[in-house]
Image: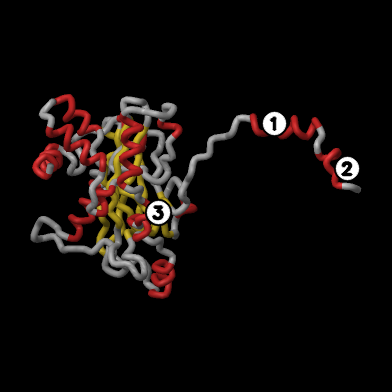
């Protein structure tokens, strides 16, 4: 059969119409889910409970947590700015600079905008799931866990107790660490971890061979701070300008990929956290902006 005959057979109207129909069909929106991440689930009453164990630094890495700053807010254009902040790497960031100018203006309405655009702090650690009543299939597995200021403070309280009758505990230690009883309540619509606490010190496993297996399945934390996870200053500035003044079609929160930069584990859901951000958490409060003003 000649090439022309092949063309005749392949160039049918039905085939073209079917292809066109397929391309024009509504596309089901895909949401990216990082299977490495563990997240507690609340029951119908708004409470959650699980037992986890914070794990030591991965093999070849120094720290058992990664600290990451980001910005997440909706601009006057209706577009969202959700980006990792260069301040994580002690570099200049266009949003922090913009917030500084707003704060320095002395106008209260500008300060309010700066508060809503403040950077958010999150941490990542490897955990071993001891008990997960809502999803028992997670038990005995290693995951990454994203958390915020409140849980980080509880980790620091274990390392550096405030009272003389309390013994310091390294919660990241296989042998002398402690299980963390994660207790979540909803308070004013937000996830609250105040009742969470560490159990008494204990070995995670009696057999060091099992501990070695767990250690070798940990996920890298350094990758969260890799330059590839941060846009350049110019790229962030361009995005900020677009969010503030707009040059493209408006986007909604549903159009934004919330998988990677989901923020503060101390708050409710990420979009709610963005929309309902207050000045109550993180160091981006009055002190932070006053610091920016001095540096300007």
Q: What is the distance, in whole Å, between disc 1 and disc 2 at their CAs?
A: 23 Å
Q: Do callouts 3 and 2 mark residues in contact (Cβ within 8 Å)?
A: no
Front residue of 125 and 234: 234
Residue lying at 29% horizontally and 67% vertically, measured from the top left: 62
Q: Is residue 28 left or right of residue 47?
A: right
- Counting from the top left corner in percent of width and height, residue 203 is at 32, 68
Residue lying at 30% horizontally and 56% vertically, measured from the top left: 66
Q: Which residue is mark 1?
A: 20
Q: Is residue 46 visible?
A: no
Q: Nearer the viewer, mark 1 or mark 3?
A: 1
- Counting from the top left corner in percent of width and height, residue 52 is at 35, 55
Q: Is residue 93 left or right of residue 227?
A: left
The tag on residue 129 is: none
The tag on residue 5 is: 2
Residue lying at 20% horizontally and 43% vertically, measured from the top left: 282
Q: What is the distance, in whole Å, between disc 3 and disc 2 at their CAs?
A: 66 Å
Q: Is residue 211 visible?
A: yes
The tag on residue 131 is: 3
Q: Secondary structure at mark 1?
A: helix
Q: Secondary structure at mark 2?
A: helix
Q: Quadrant of residue 173?
A: bottom left
* Few, some or many residues within 10 Å of mark 3 (<14, 14–19, 20+): some
């Amino acid at each position: 059969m000649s090439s022309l005959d092949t063309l005749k057979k392949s160039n049918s109207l039905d085939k073209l119409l079917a292809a066109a129909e397929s391309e024009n069909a509504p596309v089901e929106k895909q949401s990216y889910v990082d299977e490495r991440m563990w997240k507690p689930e609340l029951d119908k009453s708004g409470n959650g409970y699980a037992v986890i164990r914070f794990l030591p630094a991965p093999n070849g890495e120094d720290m058992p947590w990664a600290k990451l700053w980001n910005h997440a807010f909706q601009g006057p254009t209706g577009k969202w700015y959700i980006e990792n902040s260069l301040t994580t790497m002690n570099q200049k960031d266009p949003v922090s600079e913009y917030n500084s100018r707003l704060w320095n203006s002395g106008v209260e309405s500008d300060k309010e905008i700066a508060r809503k655009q403040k950077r958010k702090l999150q941490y990542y650690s490897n955990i071993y799931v001891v008990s997960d009543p809502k999803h028992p299939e997670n038990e005995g597995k290693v995951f990454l866990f994203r958390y915020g200021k409140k849980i980080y403070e509880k980790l620091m309280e274990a390392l550096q107790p405030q009272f003389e009758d309390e013994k310091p505990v390294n919660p990241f230690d296989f042998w002398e660490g402690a299980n963390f009883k994660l207790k979540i309540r909803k308070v004013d619509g937000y996830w609250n971890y105040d009742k969470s606490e560490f159990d008494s010190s204990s070995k995670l496993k009696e057999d060091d061979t099992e501990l070695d297996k767990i250690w070798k399945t940990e996920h890298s934390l350094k990758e969260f701070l890799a330059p590839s996870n941060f846009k350049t200053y110019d790229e962030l500035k361009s995005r900020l300008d677009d969010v503030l003044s707009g040059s493209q079609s408006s986007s909604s929160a549903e159009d934004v990929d919330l998988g990677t930069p989901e923020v503060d584990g101390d708050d409710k859901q990420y979009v709610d956290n963005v929309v309902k951000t207050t000045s109550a958490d993180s160091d981006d409060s009055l002190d932070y902006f006053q610091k920016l003003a001095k540096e300007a």
